[in-house]
Amino acid sequence: MKILVLHGPNLNLLGTREPELYGSETMEDINGSLRVLATDYRVEIDCFQSNHEGALIDRIHQAREEKVDGILFNPGGLTHTSVSLRDAISSVSIPVVEVHLSNIHAREPFRHHSHIAPVAIGQVCGFGSIGYNLALQGLLARLRS
């Protein structure tokens, strides 16, 4: 089974960007933790980060060609603005779990709406970096049921 982990804009700055909000772990720390968990679950993990919406869309399209089974996606700020990412997810028919380090529903009002949530099978937010592990467990449970 193949799982794609997508990190959106500014997530390359994790560990140094507002650690009081996003924690002190880096994106590579999160990816490493996911790879360990993936080994336990006998799945393949591929991680990709971009600060560019088009690159994320291209990677979602490529996932279909690669026959990726599921996607964990933290779209960052694009969560609240990108209809194009929503359409890309909808067009590939790959189960997606939306992930956020912070609780987007307890933050500024503009962050309360997600364009991704309606086309995702679930959303995990507010648990910091462990949320990625929870999202992977949930995604795998859904895929294997």
Image (cartoon, rainbow, N blue to C red):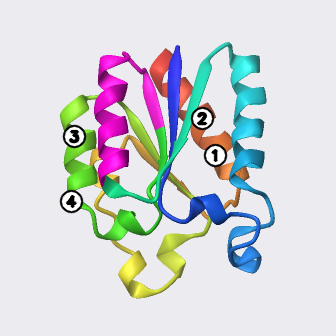
Q: Which residue is mark 3?
A: 90
Q: Which residue is mark 2?
A: 136
Circle on res. 132: 1
Could you tell me if the residues under marks 1 and 2 are in contact, i.e. CB atoms within 8 Å? yes
Mark sitting earlier along the chain (3/4)? 4
Mark sitting earlier along the chain (3/2)? 3
User: Residue at position x 27%, y 62% from top?
Assistant: 82
Query: Was residue 57 drawn as part of the magenta stretch in this picture?
Result: yes
Circle 4: residue type: Val
Q: Residue 135 in the image: x percent, y percent?
A: 58, 41
Most frequent secondary structure within the magenta stretch? helix
Cα distance between the residues tagged 3 and 4: 10 Å
Mark sitting earlier along the chain (1/4)? 4
User: Residue at position x 44%, y 28% from top?
Assistant: 70
Q: Which residue is mark 4?
A: 83
Cα distance between the residues tagged 1 and 2: 6 Å
Circle 2: residue type: Leu
The region drawn magenta spans: 54-71
